[in-house]
Image: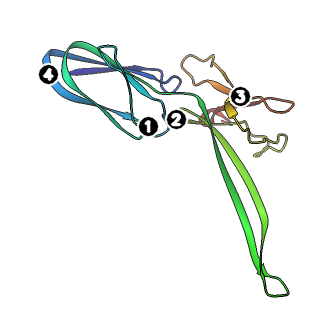
Amino acid sequence: VHIDQETDYPATGDVRLTVSTDAPHRFPLLIRVPQWADGAHIMLPDGMVTPVATGAYARIERVWQGRETVTLSLPMAPRLHHATNRNVQESFAPDGSPVAQEVLREDYVAFARGPLVYATGLVDGYRTAETLHRPVDETQLMETIPADRGAAPDILVLRQGAAPLRFEPFYAVGG
């Protein structure tokens, strides 16, 4: 059995596996589907498309013969992640009743596309020029610009406020 893999992943979400055998053989082919890949599906050699569960291995058991291709398609739509860092100070009022006061709150957002996390370029180690308001539906504000560097991942642009924010894969930003 010989298995060839062709892909531009993580720039694109399609992974083609070509299984070649000299004679018919029955065996399972297990393909890992990432946890983030909601909506992923596999196209089988007979052309049938099968949705697959995320965070698990898709199992394709059959008699393989000759050259047969299986294609895993992973969704690559941008996703918004949100986190909050809060510090609440608890004390007592003069009458003895408990008081909780929020003294610090920082909200963070991150964008991901496929397995990659995206970031903006840094200015002196931090950004103060933009305020990012968490969008209700980020897909309406996010635009994907195809990369012009061969199989490099695309660039995301968030259109919000006066100037659009450009996001690139974290590994490519800031050297």
Please state, as top left, top right, bottom left or bottom right, where the C terminus lies in the image. top right
Mark found first going from the N terminus, 1 or 4: 4
**Mark 4: which amino acid?**
His
Query: Along the line of sight, which residue is nearer the eye, 40 or 148?
Result: 40
Quarter of image, res 81: top right
Q: Secondary structure at mark 4?
A: strand
**Mark 2: which amino acid?**
Pro
Q: Residue 140 got which mark?
A: 3
The x, y position of residue 169, in whole percent, is: 61, 33
Q: Nearer the viewer, mark 1 or mark 3?
A: 3
Say left or right for 123 vs 149: right
Residue on which disc 2 sits: 115
Q: Nearer the viewer, mark 2 or mark 3?
A: 3
The x, y position of residue 92, in whole percent, is: 79, 83
Mark found first going from the N terminus, 4 or 2: 4
Residue on which disc 1 sits: 34
Q: Residue 25 got which mark?
A: 4
